[in-house]
Image: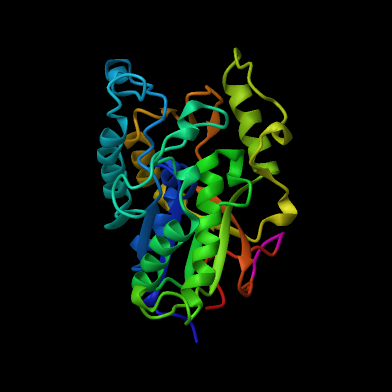
């Protein structure tokens, strides 16, 4: 029996504000439009992000250290653009702090998410899972996509929480056990990345960035992809959500760049790898699912 759209519940776990819009913005907008309940769980405020708006440079961690508070507003605007009304911070707003990149002093901050107590962080996520009761959870792979400590930690916490939430012996005080039907990791096929890089190079005669997509840390082999989600009808919502994160990224037509100035295509078709649950019916050349709820 197919789930009624109004009974569908999707939970996405992300490390920082802006990760959700970049990776899953079209997906989130699509399921909201279809009547599903969409919940975003963000693990930090993104306090260590680089500020790309010159007049806001004083918010940075090494200046006034007010960027996290500012990014709460950016995230709220992004969620409004996508139509998502249920967005939360793991453990409450500001419980864990952006850990910064590997080897930076931010790794040692007493509230750094990278150093979060596993039991506390898992319990905080379990409480959300048991309240929202999603059939589908979306997170990162074990490398956190590109290796940021907070992305890796978000992966660990999400996967541990999925297991713990279904365990009737785990923390009855956190609610009734709930088993998630399907868990996906966000991925980008290497073939798609290469296509975007080739298009960027063709559009910009001065482009001097990476030309081989296999050099991109988060490039996934096409064979690992299991779901291709068409979000073309939600391009406007996704780009508006990305634009809301103005301190962190710049948009130029169909391309965007973070502080590393690596131009990337704004993807309105978003890709996933199923790692828990039964794969639903597929379509097209690869036999990929076209719905995260396929088979439910």
Q: Is residue 236 left or right of residue 296?
A: left
Q: Is the residue 171 above or below the residue 247 in the image?
A: below
**How many numbered marks have been drawn onto this rendered protein structure?**
0
- Residue 131, by quadrant, is bottom left
Give the magenta part as a residue range. 282-286
Q: Is residue 78 left or right of residue 112?
A: left
Q: What secondary structure prevails in the magenta region?
A: loop
> Closest to the observer: 290 or 107?
107
Give the colour scheme shown. rainbow
Tell me residue 192's x, y (percent): 64, 42
Is residue 257 one of those drawn in magenta?
no
Identify the residue at horizontal 50%, vertical 73% (top origin): 180
Identify the residue at horizontal 33%, vertical 68% (top origin): 35
Residue 107 in sight = yes
Tell me residue 188's x, y (percent): 61, 46
Tell me residue 61's x, y (percent): 36, 25
Q: Is the residue 203 above or below the residue 119 in the image?
A: above
> Closest to the observer: 289 or 141?
141
> Closest to the observer: 269 or 70?
70
Residue 139 in sight = no
Identify the residue at horizontal 38%, vertical 55% (top origin): 41
Q: Residue furthest bottom?
A: 1
Is residue 283 one of those drawn in magenta?
yes
Tell me residue 87's x, y (percent): 31, 55
């Amino acid at each position: 029996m197919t789930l009624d759209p109004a009974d569908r519940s999707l939970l996405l776990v992300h490390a920082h504000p802006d990760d959700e819009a970049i990776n899953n913005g079209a997906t989130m907008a699509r399921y909201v439009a279809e009547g599903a309940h969409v919940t975003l769980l963000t693990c930090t405020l993104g306090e260590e992000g680089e500020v790309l708006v010159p007049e806001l440079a004083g918010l940075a961690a090494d200046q006034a250290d007010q960027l996290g508070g500012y990014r709460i507003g950016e995230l709220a605007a992004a969620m409004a653009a996508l139509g998502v009304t249920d967005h939360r911070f793991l453990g409450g707003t500001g419980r864990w702090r952006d850990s910064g990149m590997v080897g930076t002093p931010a790794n040692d901050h007493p509230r750094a998410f990278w150093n979060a107590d596993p039991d506390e962080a898992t319990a905080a996520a379990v409480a959300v899972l048991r309240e929202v009761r999603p059939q589908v959870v979306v997170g990162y792979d074990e490398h956190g996509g590109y290796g940021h400590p907070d992305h890796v930690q978000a992966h660990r916490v999400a996967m541990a929480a999925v297991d713990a939430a279904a365990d009737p012996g785990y923390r009855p005080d956190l609610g009734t056990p709930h088993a998630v039907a399907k868990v996906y990791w966000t991925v980008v096929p290497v073939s798609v990345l290469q296509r975007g890089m080739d298009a960027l190079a063709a559009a910009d005669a001065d482009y001097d960035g990476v030309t081989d997509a296999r050099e991109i840390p988060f490039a996934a082999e096409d064979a690992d992809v299991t779901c291709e989600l068409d979000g073309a009808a939600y391009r406007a919502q996704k780009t508006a959500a990305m634009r809301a994160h103005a301190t962190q990224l710049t948009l130029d037509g169909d391309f965007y760049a973070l502080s590393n100035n690596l131009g990337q295509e704004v993807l309105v078709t978003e890709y996933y790898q199923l790692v828990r649950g039964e794969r639903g019916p597929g379509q097209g050349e690869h036999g990929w699912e076209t719905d995260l709820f396929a088979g439910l």
